Every structure is written in structure tokens, then in C-alpha cells.
Amino acid sequence: SNTPSATTICQRSRLQGPHSHTDVSTLDTMSTCFYASTAAGAQSLDLRVCGSSLTTTAEGATETLATLSELDALITVTDILWILVCGILVFWMQAGFAMLESGSVRRKNTNNILFKNLMDASIGAICFWLLGYSFAFGNAKYIYQDVGRDNRFIGAGNWALQNFNNDFDYHSFFFQWAFAGAAATIVSGAVAERCRLEAYFVYTVVLTTFIYPIVVHWVWSSTGWLSAFYTDSDGDRFLKENGVIDFAGSGVVHMVGGFAGLTGAIAIGPRRELLSDDPRVRASVKGSSDLLCALGVSILWMGWYGFNAGSTLGAGQGVIGQTASAEPALTYINIAAKVAVTTTISAAMGAITTMVYSRVVLRNYKLTLCLNGVLAGLVSITAPCSVVEPWAAMMIGIIGSIVYVMASNTVKACGIDDPLDAFAVHGVCGVWGVLSVGIFATQSNISRTYGFDNNAVQSGNQFRNQLIGVLVIAGWTTVTSSIIFFGLKFAGLLRVSEEEEKVGLDASEHGVEVLEGKSVEMKAKGEQPV
């Protein structure tokens, strides 16, 4: 209703009723019910519209059709359900990583790479529960509140979720753990086929307990110094004007995984076949199954909708920053819908651009290159997905795929062995994704998503913030990862022996050997297969 005597439809969530802009006859196709009150400022609602059916209580009656608290409860349930479903989609990406990585390594190492993916999720769950989530979000309060020992560098509260003494907060941990698992899994591809399991376990523990959570705290917590959600008593960010905008994790997740993977690949060295002067020997490191790679990327693309769209962290609530009274107020699900579109466009353009490059430069259509082009587009759009227009998403995907190809060729030219191009896809495209916010984001989109109504993008301030974020995340991840990987290397614990690498890690680490195209279990290490 637009009359002064009536409150806005769904006032608590600031969702305006469709009949304010639409003829009632169009409501016949709608199944959603809208509630309102005929008294301004009322805490109960006595009018309901379902389709074209209008229901109202009798004049002077004391009963109500719904109360604002009941609608709030419904909104809360919707938000939690949305986050749980999206968290499941993000965890489903583990299956995509497993398929992609097993298809990219040789048959003799498939058990090993699958085992690492399993342990990423399992070890990461326990470490993130005990300490990681606490380092990331701490007591979840603003800096001007009683934050306990939380500070701008690290969270320090809610150990092992001890503050979750009710059932209203666990969905947050579940969703964030799925992200932590994804960051850890990226590294496994960079050190595939030659890393000892024990060394990988050590790194997974450190990554999910400390390295990754610190970056999460900086960028996504309410007290982190880079965070767009940091708010002091004056309502300002620590990093003016808007902090670093990384909506779903181009920097937080993908840069951390990509730069950690590069560090690990440098520390561990290339696979022994790549040191040969014989091109046939070097070509023998080709992956075992393009089919698994294609299946893996398809699953990852699907899971990315949970990754990006789920980062609204809600579905039914109203969005801050809706200022134009003539327009209907947005809800989080509206932002999620736009995120799904920008994510799709960027991924598609990544594939198309690498397809054109493959045909023009390589003279053929290379499937694995185009699959990585999809991932390059997805990683690139992860940070700006909510603050750019569809045409900008197209440009981000095009540039992201070009950046990926250039980075991949550069890494190979430097003699660094990264079997899955983890650094080129996740590290470098993650950098581009974060920086692209400062180039393609619009003031209106930032206002709708974050509530900041300023000209930070036009003034260059936003790009400065994004650049600071990129440098800090890259530096932190590289330094901390180097301590772990090179420490393990100097201790002789990082790489398997040349003989173990030759026979394959399935045999040396798991007691499984490939004979005549079939995997068979060994009785014990060194004994005849059965």
C-alpha cells in the first residue's frame, strides 16, 4: 500500500508489495503471500494477499493473521536453509576437485591424489573447528564493542565453537569450513605426484588452522583491518573508504590456495620426467583421463553457484543501502540471482576465449585448456560478482582467461612444475579478480550490496584498497607457506624418493599398484601383488 496510513508490505524485511507497481490481475500466478498492516507502525499484520486473494481480519477484531516476529522467524529459517544448501554445494566442489585432479595425474597416482582430497576435508574440518574458525571470526563483534582478545590481525574467541550455546549459529561454521576445505585442496594439485603424505598433512593442518583463517579475519570479519565489514564507532572502515571488497573469495580463498601451491611447487621441485631432454619422456606426464577432468570442471562450475551466490549469507533479509524510495527494496536473494548471472557469463567467456586462443595459436581445440579457461573465469568473477554489471562480467572473464594463459606459459618457462596450473588459475586469476573490483565495480552496485554510497571507484580509492589487499594476501601466504614447505624440505620430509616416484605413489604410499591397466593391492610394501 502507498497510503500514509498503512505500513509497507513485509516492513521488517523492507520488501515492498507487488501491488504497489503491478495490476492485481497479475498476482494470480504468484504463490507467495504478502502481509501488511492497516495501521502505521503496527507490530502485527491484519492484511494478507495470496495471489489475487485478499484476506483481512474483521474491523476491530483482536486476532491477527501474522506478527512481525513470526515473519522474522520465517526469514531466519529461510536464511539458514539457504546457507546450508549453498554450503553443501561448496562441499560438493570437493568431488569436482577430486575428479579434475585424478584425471590430471597418471594412473599410478590416482589413489594418492584422491586420498589427499579426502584428508583435506577431514583434517580441515577438525582444525577449523578447534582453532581456525576462532582465528577467523573470534567473538564476531565490531571493534567498538566488547571484542575480548580479538584485534585487527586475528580473532581470539569462541574456541571450538564454545560460544555457540544455541542452534542459531552453526550454519555459519558449516559454510565457512567448506570454503577452508576448498583453499586447502587447491594446493594438492600443485605438488601432485611427488609429495609425501605426511608432509601434505602437516601443511593442511597449518593452512586450515592459521594461514587461511588469518586472511579470512582480515577481509571478512567485523574487526579485520582490510574488511569492508569493519565499522568503528563513527561507522568508518579502517581502510578508507570501503575496505577491500572480495565478495566470495578471489583473494581470500583462491589467492591463498594458489600462492601456497606455487610455493610448494618451487620447494618440492619438478617431477623427474620433466628434467629429461627427451620430449617423449616429458610428454609421459600427461594426465590419465580427460573425461574425469571434464566431469570435475562441470561439478566445480555447478558448486561455484553455492560459492558465489551463497556468499550473500542470507536469502530473505533486506539489503542495506536501498535508498531510492521509488524502487522496491532488494533482498539478499535478489543479489544472489544477479551473482549467478555474472558468474555464468564470466565462466562462459573464459571458456570461449581459451577456445579461440587454442584454435588460433595452437592450431587445434584443446579441451584441457578450455576447461581451465572456465575455472579462470570463475575465479576471476568470485570477488566482483555482486558489484559489477553483466557486461563487465564478460570482460572480466575474457581478461581472466588471457591472464591465465600468460601465467601458465610463464610458470612453465621458469621451469616450475605445476601439474594442474593451480597457481595460474587460482593465484593469478585470483589477483585479477580482486583488482577488477576497483576497475569494473559501480557505485550503485556497491551501495546495493554493501550499503556504501560514495565515489571510491571513480576516485581510484577502491583500486588502491584492492591493490593493498592483493599485496598483503600474496605476501602473507608466500612467507608462511615458505616456512612450512622449505622447513619440510630441509628436514628431508617433503618429497618421496626417486624410486617411489618412479613406481607411483599408489604403490609406495597406499599399497596399490597398476598392473596391465588394473589397480591391485599389495600384501605389504615391497611384496608381490595379490
Image (tube, rainbow, N blue to C red):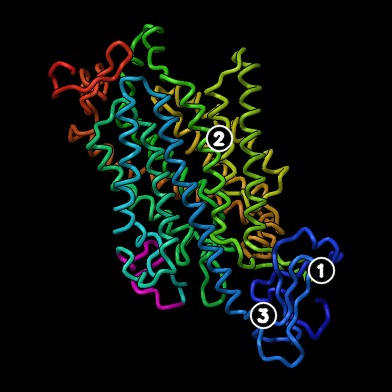
Write down the residue under mark 1: 19
Disc assigned to residue 65: 3
Left or right, residue 360 beside residue 131: right
Q: Are marks 1 and 2 in contact (CB under 8 Å)?
A: no
* Earlier-in-chain disc, 1 versus 2: 1
- Residue 110: name its quadrant: top left
Residue 463 in view in this figure? yes
Amino acid type of the residue that numbered disc 3 sits on in the rendered structure: Leu
How far across and down, in percent of the image, does residue 227 sit? 50, 61
Left or right, residue 178 beside residue 325: left
512 drawn magenta: no
* Earlier-in-chain disc, 3 versus 2: 3
Which secondary structure type mostly characterizes the magenta part of the structure?
Answer: loop
Query: For this rendering, which residue is in front, 95 or 188?
Result: 95
Left or right, residue 117 beside residue 355: left
Amino acid type of the residue that numbered disc 2 sits on in the rendered structure: Ala
158 drawn magenta: yes
How far across and down, in percent of the image, does residue 447 sit? 67, 62
Q: Badge 1: few (under 14), some or many (20 or more) residues near its Cα, within 10 Å?
A: some
Write down the residue under mark 2: 376
Regarding mark 1 in the picture, which secondary structure is present there? helix
Q: Are marks 3 and 2 in contact (CB under 8 Å)?
A: no
How far apart are the two marked residues, 3 and 1, measured between alpha carbons? 19 Å
How far across and down, in percent of the image, does residue 331 sit? 65, 63
Regarding mark 3 in the picture, which secondary structure is present there? loop
Query: For this rendering, which residue is in front, 81 or 179?
Result: 81
Q: Residue furthest bottom?
A: 60
